[in-house]
C-alpha cells in the first residue's frame, strides 16, 4: 500500500511515493523549470536516480513525463497498490479545516481561495487537475497548510482593523506550515512518550520559509504566519513582520507598484535582502570571512526568533518543550544555540555536545532533567500528507 504525494509549486512539482504505515519513501522525484525553454525531471527509485531534460510547457506535461519515467522504472501507478494521491494545498481559507476528498466542488473552492494565495493555490490546483486526469481511478485528497490553525483562538486570529473590511475580504490569521507543525508536535509527544494533551510546546519550523507556533495540549493557540506566509519570522527571502506603513511609504515615495512591493518583500528580503545569500551554509561562510552585512542579517534573524519565543512563552504560561525543525532548524547548531542563549533563568538550556550531534533522528539537545526540554525533530510533510490521505480513504 502506498500514497503518491504531490506538492505542486509555481514552476516545479515534487512527488513522492510513500508507504504510510512505516513512512518509507518508495520513490521520489522533482519536475523543475515548468514553462521554461528547458525543463528537468529526476526520479530516485531503489537508490538510483534517472534524469531527463525536455521542455514542459505546463504542469500536465511535467507530471506526465514523471509518471512515464516511473513506468519505465517499473512503477505503474495505476496498478502499484496506490490507494490515494495526497496533494499539498497551501490555502484552505475558512472553508477547509481538515484533509478533504477532492471532487469538482472542492476544486472550485480551492480555486476561489486563489485570491488569498495567488502564488500557491493556482499551481496546487493544476497538480490536482493533472493527477485527476491521469489517475482517474485513484481517490485524491487535499491536505491544507492552514488546517492545523483553523481553530486558533479569536484573539490570535483577529487583526485589529475595521471588522467589516476584514470580514468582507477574509482578512484574518490563517497560519501556514500547519502540516509540519502538527506532525512535529505529534512526534514530540511520541518521542517523549507523553500524552499530547499534557504538553505545552513551541515549534520552530525554520526552513527557507519559517514559522513558529505555540501548541497547547495538541491544539495550536498561536502562529507567526498570517493572512499569507509573509508575516512573522525573518526568512530566506521574505521579510516577515514589517511596519505596514513601509508598504504605503514605498508606494508613495518610491513609486513602487503593489506587485513590485510584493516581489521585494517575498523574494528580495529576509536573509537574502540583507546579505545577498539565502542559504544558511553560505551565510555562515560569509560571517566567518568577516562580512558585516551577513552578520547583521543573522543577528536580525535571531532577534526576531527570540521575540516570538518570548511571546509564545508568555502565551503558553508554562512551556514543556521547544522544538527545532526544517532545513535550518534541523541542521544549523549555531541558530539553535543562539536562539536559546542566556535563558537559563527560564529553565531553557542547550547542551553544546548534544547540540553538535548530526543525525536524521529526533533528539534532545537539552540536558536530562531540564525544566524545558529542547528537541530537534525532523519534519516530514510528505509522510504527514500520505498518512492523512490514507486515513481519509480508509
Ligand atoms: P523549504 O522546504 O522551506 O524550501 P527546507 O526546510 O528544505 O526549506 O530548508 C532549506 C534551508 O535549510 C536551506 O536554504 C538552508 O538555509 C538550510 N540548510 C539546509 N542544510 C543545512 C545545513 N547543513 N546547515 C545549515 N543550514 C542548512
Image (tube, rainbow, N blue to C red):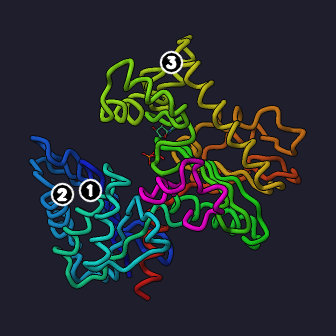
Q: Residue at x 77, y 33 (%)?
A: 341
Where does the magenta region start and end? 149-175
Q: Residue at x 70, y 53 (%)?
A: 202
Q: Which residue is mark 1?
A: 123
Q: How many marks?
A: 3
Which is more foreground, mark 2 or mark 3? 2
Looking at the image, residue 31 lies above or below residue 198: above
Residue 20 at x, y = what percent?
A: 46, 75
Location of the C terminus (image quadrant): bottom left
**Secondary structure under badge 1?**
helix
Tell me which numbered mark, 2 or 3, is placed earlier along the sequence: 2
Q: Residues within 10 Å of mark 1 (few under 14, many from 20)?
A: many
**Alpha carbon separation for disc pair 1 and 2:** 8 Å
Do the numbered discs 1 and 2 sit on residues whose CB atoms are within 8 Å?
Answer: yes
Viewer-proximal residue, 179 or 257?
Answer: 257
**Alpha carbon separation for disc pair 2 and 3:** 37 Å
**Secondary structure under badge 2?**
helix
Amino acid at each position: 500500500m502506498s500514497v503518491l504525494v504531490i506538492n505542486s509549486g509555481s514552476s516545479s512539482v515534487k512527488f513522492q511515493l510513500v508507504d504510510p504505515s512505516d513512512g518509507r519513501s518508495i520513490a521520489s522525484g522533482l519536475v523543475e523549470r515548468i514553462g521554461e525553454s528547458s525543463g528537468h525531471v529526476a526520479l530516485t527509485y531503489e537508490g538510483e536516480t534517472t534524469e531527463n531534460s525536455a521542455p514542459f510547457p505546463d504542469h500536465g506535461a511535467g507530471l506526465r513525463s514523471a509518471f512515464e519515467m516511473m513506468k519505465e522504472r517499473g512503477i505503474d501507478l495505476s496498478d502499484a497498490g496506490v490507494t490515494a494521491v495526497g496533494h499539498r494545498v497551501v490555502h484552505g481559507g475558512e472553508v477547509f479545516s481538515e484533509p478533504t476528498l477532492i471532487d469538482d466542488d472542492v476544486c472550485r473552492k480551492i480555486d476561489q481561495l486563489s485570491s488569498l494565495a495567488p502564488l500557491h493555490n493556482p499551481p496546487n490546483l493544476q497538480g490536482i487537475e493533472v493527477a485527476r486526469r491521469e489517475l482517474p481511478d485513484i481517490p485524491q485528497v487535499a491536505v491544507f497548510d492552514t488546517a492545523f490553525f483553523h481553530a486558533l483562538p479569536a484573539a490570535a486570529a483577529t487583526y485589529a482593523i475595521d471588522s467589516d473590511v476584514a470580514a468582507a475580504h477574509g482578512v484574518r490569521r490563517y497560519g501556514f506550515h500547519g502540516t509540519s507543525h502538527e506532525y512535529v508536535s505529534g512526534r514530540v509527544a511520541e518521542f517523549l512518550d507523553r500524552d499530547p494533551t499534557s504538553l505545552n510546546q513551541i515549534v520552530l519550523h525554520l526552513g527557507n520559509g519559517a514559522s513558529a507556533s505555540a501548541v497547547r495540549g495538541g491544539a495550536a493557540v498561536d502562529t507567526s504566519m498570517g493572512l499569507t506566509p509573509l508575516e512573522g519570522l525573518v526568512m530566506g527571502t521574505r521579510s516577515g513582520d514589517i511596519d505596514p506603513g513601509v508598504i504605503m511609504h514605498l508606494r508613495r515615495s518610491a513609486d513602487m507598484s503593489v506587485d513590485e512591493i510584493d516581489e521585494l518583500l517575498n523574494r528580495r528580503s529576509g536573509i537574502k535582502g540583507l546579505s545577498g545569500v539565502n542559504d544558511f551554509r553560505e551565510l555562515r561562510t560569509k560571517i566567518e570571512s568577516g562580512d558585516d552585512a551577513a552578520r547583521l542579517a543573522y543577528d536580525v534573524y535571531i532577534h526576531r526568533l527570540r521575540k516570538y519565543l518570548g511571546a509564545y512563552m508568555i502565551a503558553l504560561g508554562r512551556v514543556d518543550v521547544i522544538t527545532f525543525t526544517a532545513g535550518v532548524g534541523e541542521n544549523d547548531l549555531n541558530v539553535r544555540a543562539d536562539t536559546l542563549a542566556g535563558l537559563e533563568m527560564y529553565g531553557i538550556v542547550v547542551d553544546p555536545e548534544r547540540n553538535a550531534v548530526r543525525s536524521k533522528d529526533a533528539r534532545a539537545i537539552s540536558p536530562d532533567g531540564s525544566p524545558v526540554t529542547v528537541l530537534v525533530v525532523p519534519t516530514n510533510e510528505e509522510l504527514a500528507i500520505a498518512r492523512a490521505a490514507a486515513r481519509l480513504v480508509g
